[in-house]
Image: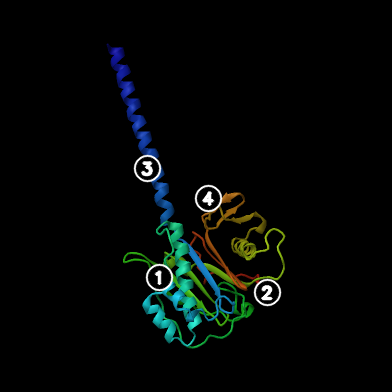
Amino acid sequence: MRRSKCSSRRLRRRKDCARSGTMRLRLSKSLRRWRRPILPYIGNDIVDLQDSGNRRKSVDSRYLKKTLTDEEIEIVHLSQNPDRALWSFWACKEAAYKVLKKSHLVDSFIPRRWSVRIRLPSAKHPASLGSESNILPRSIMGSYHQPHEGYVIISEREAVHVYLFLHLSYVHCVASDSLAALDSSIWGVNILSGKKDRQNNGSSSQARKRLARRLAAFLHISQNVIKIRRIKNGTDLQPPIVSIGGMRSEIDLSLSHDGRFISYAFICGNGISRRSKTMNESEKQP
């Protein structure tokens, strides 16, 4: 009987250990699921104002009703530069959607239901050189404009912070679900090269190369160890991810291109501010 009691006690202990191990596994999985969503995400969007498909789109009433709220439509009509006002609202909403898509807070992009809260200037800005960055010296890059700060209201409980940059040739927006992350984000705008890429003739390939070059300089590593790719989920392309030395990185990034321009933005988990670091390498025009 003693032997059987000992056996039963051991069996009971094993079951308790098994339950404890299962609980640890559940906690570990839930921790991983919880940790990732709290990391900030970033999105960016650029619109070429001189592109033929974008010019005079502000007079298309059907398009305005599909993409803007009634208040935003009124602002576009009253603006001295209606096209720029329209695409400013659009860029903010598109950049915000790229943030929300990563956090799985929204399944579809319905810009008409989202409201942008930002003050658009009526005066025109000086022309840009076409290539800008928030980390390179002004003497190298030319004019660098301070952003117009605002946010995109998704619902009563959800909003995305945005920085909007306005130029005669394009509008560029960078968005994040964290204002601190947005302030420490790294971004850049470049003119598309006329040279064809052997692997991909599209602007997406050039955008990835520009971003990889910028990441390499920022992290002080070789560009050859950086891989930026997008994975297909069925027919849908997922947001871009970056791998360094074959290991997936926690760096969150965003790519965009339109007309003559490509743009990118990324944030690192180390909290390095864009104001605390400068680079010696210039992203000159190709």
What's under tag 1, amino acid-wise?
A: Arg
Which circle's residue, 3 or 1, is located before the other in the chain? 3
For residue 211, above or below residue 27: below
Q: Seen in the image, is 5 located left or right of residue 72? A: left
Which circle's residue, 2 or 3, is located before the other in the chain? 3
For residue 26, above or below residue 68: above
Q: What residue sits 40% from the left and 70% below the top?
A: 112
Return the residue nearer the eye: 215 or 68: 68
What's under tag 3, amino acid-wise?
A: Leu
The image position of residue 153, as x and y in percent, is 37, 69
Q: Quadrant of the N terminus?
A: top left
Asked whether the viewer can see residue 135, the reply is: yes
Which circle's residue, 1 or 4, is located before the other in the chain? 1
Residue wearing tag 2: 285
* Residue 27: mark in rendering: 3
Residue wearing tag 1: 112
The crowding category of the residue bearing disc 4, from other C-alpha atoms within 10 Å (few below 14, some 14 to 19, many at least 20), is few
What's under tag 2, amino acid-wise?
A: Gln
